[in-house]
Image (cartoon, rainbow, N blue to C red):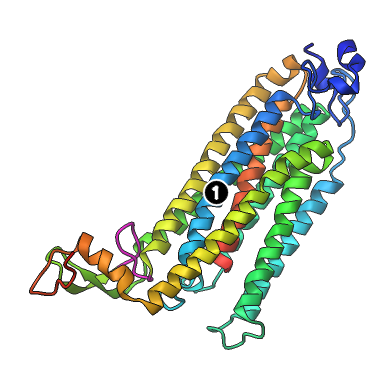
């Protein structure tokens, strides 16, 4: 500690200190998140490009595709996805509370908030599975769609729901982008839940007491907030616009 | 050496064994409230402006799009600067993270223009995409194949 305080300002980048006042682990997590932001940006930008290429008639309206809600037959647009957004924002809040409790070495509070964060993650993943299920099974009556068959002839078939090859709601690319982007985001949520569980096990095992800080919880927290951040953009570009 | 990182943190570090400090969570709930209200405004606006297939639309879809993007950026700001604590980091670190994303803005502008250009080609020259599609995916049937090389 004496070494670091004696370092003069000109020597900040000379090694031996953390120039950003951020520990190595946190800095690398930030850099990883920036690179991950590039990945998600590229995916959403390609979605936007294809959306702009398509005419409004051809592109499905998300309001009409995702308007189901569990335990009811009513069609309410945006209701379920708003609930998913609320769940993820809420789990982000419990994560900040866990990090804040870690700063105060309040082990009991860290355990409580981390456990709630994991619960929120599972709820979100379950909701996403439900959403996918309804998109894949489609409407009750299906829709007649013109396709080109193996002989190269135009044929009319009845299509139920969407998959990687055909989409009853309209543009095939809409389904493909939906599966890829929400699937990629869901993978991030799933790995975030795994990381949260690892953090919780470490806290329970007394790892953080031994090393004298809760930085692991903080790094996992950064990742979790990033996942929430991505969802905010997916929500806007897939469901609102 | 091992100790310097902990010492440089902006938050206070508790000495283990001392009584636990009182939680300071006001700023967290403030952030939560902002995120909740902004999302509620988005959803409410989507309902009001587009209930029943555009019959009650009082503002254009173009305005709605930019309105939603602006509110999304507000939410992103609060998540990154408050929840992820970037607002409390050193100025040089804030620049390192946020300046990098400016390149993405340029990429977005380029690709959105590209998307509209592709649409115009499709509308004005319908054969442009059809031709390549036929060549690659459809076996010629019944003299329908005009696209000799």
Looking at the image, residue A216 lies above or below residue A173: above
Location of the N terminus of chain A by quadrant is: top right
Q: Residue at x 73, y 16 (%)?
A: A211
B38 and B10: which is toward the camera: B10
Total numbered labels placed on residues in the image? 1
Residue sticking out furthest to the bottom? B55
Q: Is residue A194 visible?
A: yes
Asked if residue B68 is among those painted magenta in the image, a careful observer would answer no
Looking at the image, residue B88 lies above or below residue B131: above
Our reading of the magenta stretch's main secondary structure is: loop
Residue A151 screen position, x and y as percent: 11, 66
The magenta stretch spans which residues? A160-170
Q: Is residue A84 visible?
A: no
Question: Which quadrant of the structure image shows residue A100?
Answer: top right
Mark 1 = which residue?
Answer: A40
Q: What's the chain of the residue with tag 1?
A: A
Residue A229 screen position, x and y as percent: 64, 50
Residue B120 screen position, x and y as percent: 44, 74
Q: Is residue B31 left or right of residue A115?
A: right
Residue A30 screen position, x and y as percent: 67, 35
Q: Residue at x 66, y 48 (%)?
A: B101
B78 and B51: which is toward the camera: B78
Location of the C terminus of chain A by quadrant is: bottom right
Q: Is residue A217 left or right of residue B110?
A: right
């Amino acid at each position: 500690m004496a070494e670091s305080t004696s370092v003069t300002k000109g020597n900040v980048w000379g090694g031996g200190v953390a120039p950003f006042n951020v520990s190595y682990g946190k800095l690398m997590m930030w850099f990883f998140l920036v690179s991950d932001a590039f990945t998600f940006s590229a995916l959403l930008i390609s979605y936007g490009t294809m959306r702009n290429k398509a005419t409004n008639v051809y592109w499905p309206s998300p309001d009409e595709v995702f308007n189901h809600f569990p335990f009811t037959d009513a069609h309410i647009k945006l209701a379920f996805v708003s609930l998913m957004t609320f769940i993820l924002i809420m789990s982000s809040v419990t994560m900040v509370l866990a990090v804040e409790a870690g700063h105060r070495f309040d082990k009991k509070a860290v355990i409580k908030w981390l456990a709630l964060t994991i619960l929120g993650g599972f709820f979100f993943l379950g909701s996403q599975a439900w959403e996918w299920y309804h998109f894949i099974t489609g409407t009750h009556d299906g829709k007649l769609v013109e396709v080109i068959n193996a002989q190269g002839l135009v044929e009319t078939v009845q299509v139920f729901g969407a998959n990687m090859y055909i989409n009853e709601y309209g543009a095939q690319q809409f389904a493909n982008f939906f599966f890829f982007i929400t699937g990629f985001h869901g993978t991030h949520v799933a790995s975030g839940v795994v990381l949260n569980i690892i953090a919780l096990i470490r806290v329970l095992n007394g790892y953080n007491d031994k090393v004298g800080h809760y930085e692991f919880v903080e790094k996992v927290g950064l990742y979790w907030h990033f996942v929430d951040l991505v969802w905010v953009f997916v929500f806007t570009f897939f469901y609102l616009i | 050496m091992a100790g310097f990182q902990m010492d440089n943190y902006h938050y206070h570090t508790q000495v283990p064994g001392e009584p636990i400090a009182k939680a300071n969570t006001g700023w967290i709930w403030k952030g939560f409230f902002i995120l909740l209200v902004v999302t509620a405004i988005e959803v409410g606006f989507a309902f009001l402006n587009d209930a029943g297939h555009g019959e009650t639309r009082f503002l254009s879809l173009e305005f709605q799009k930019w309105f939603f993007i602006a509110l999304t950026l507000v939410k992103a700001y609060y998540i990154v600067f408050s929840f992820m604590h970037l607002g409390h980091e050193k100025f040089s670190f804030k620049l390192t993270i946020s300046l990098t994303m400016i390149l993405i803005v340029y990429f977005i502008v380029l690709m959105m223009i590209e998307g509209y250009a592709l649409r115009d080609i499709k509308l004005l020259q319908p054969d442009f995409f059809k031709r390549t599609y036929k060549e690659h995916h459809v076996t010629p049937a019944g003299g329908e194949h005009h696209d000799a090389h």
